[in-house]
Amino acid sequence: MNFQNYFKNKTVLITGSGRGIGLEIAKEYLNYGAKVIALDLNIKKLLYLKKRYKNKILTEKLDLSNLDNLKNYLKKLPKNFKNINILINNAGMKSSKNLVETDINKLNNLINFNSIKVIEISRILMNFSLKKNKGRIINIGSSLSSHGAVFRAQGGGSDYSVTKSMVHIITKIMAYECAKFKINVNAIAPGIIQTPMHARPMRETEKKHLDKIPLNRIGLPKDISGTALFLGSNYSSYITGQIIHINGGMLMIG
């Protein structure tokens, strides 16, 4: 089956798309014909996509800590990008502190950005176009939020794991509440993926984690992007409220 232009009538908004998983998802949607709105504080790596795909992608340096920035940006979108069908909530902050020692204000900020913003951004996009289009919301969670990963110290910190656990719960509740609008809501939970956020050389990552991953390799952003395509397609029309773990089998070792 030829999927080359499968998403040619779709517009996808991706937060945190300037590197790593978000950047790879943006590339894949563009490759399959979608128009992409790519938002990030750092858009340097998105410029080559802009050069290659020209009028198929909009890139914007946008600070999502103040959502008035997003609301104002949406108002100014060109007409051919206003009909957003798919939202991918990928923006997030990394942290590696444990709960009993971390500064509570920093923890609140982390929860607000990684978790609460998922709700707020989703609500903004629902009212903007997703309700009308019976669209899709795809949240990026983390397999590190699962007990088998946290207690075996697979990576990340307790604080980060809490925020991503919240994303998983938010996904399930939103899926139930959005069903009446015919909006599917799912999450992808990556395991150990080699990205700039991970900020560790591959050899060091392998030394620390490889013995805990049955498939015996560290994941790459492209291991995530295919599932993001699937969840945005008609082939997933009867799937909602699901957390899809992509971790090389990591959670089989509890």
Image: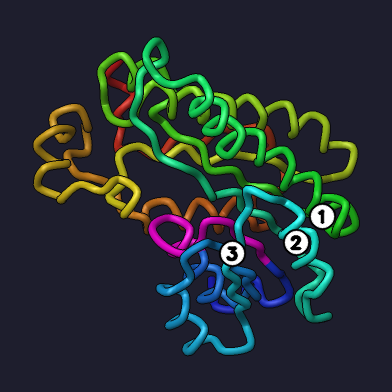
Looking at the picture, how far across and down is residue 70, in whole percent? 72, 59
Is residue 213 rendered magenta in the image? no
Q: Position of residue 209 (x, y in %)?
A: 18, 33
- Going by the numbered disc 3, the residue's amino acid type is Leu
Q: Which residue is mark 3?
A: 39
- Tell me if 2 is positioned left or right of 144 in this view: right
Q: Residue at x 53, y 43 (%)?
A: 140
Which residue does the numbered mark 1 point to in the structure image? 130
Report crowding for label 1: few under 14, some 14 to 19, many 20 or more residues within 10 A (C-alpha). many
Tell me if I can see residue 127 in this picture: yes
Residues 75 and 90: in front is: 75
Q: Assign the C terminus to one quadrant of the image.
A: top left
Q: Residue at x 63, y 39 (%)?
A: 186
Does dot 3 land on a helix, a strand or a loop? Answer: strand
Q: Nearer the viewer, mark 1 or mark 3?
A: 3
Q: Which residues are magenta?
A: 12-25
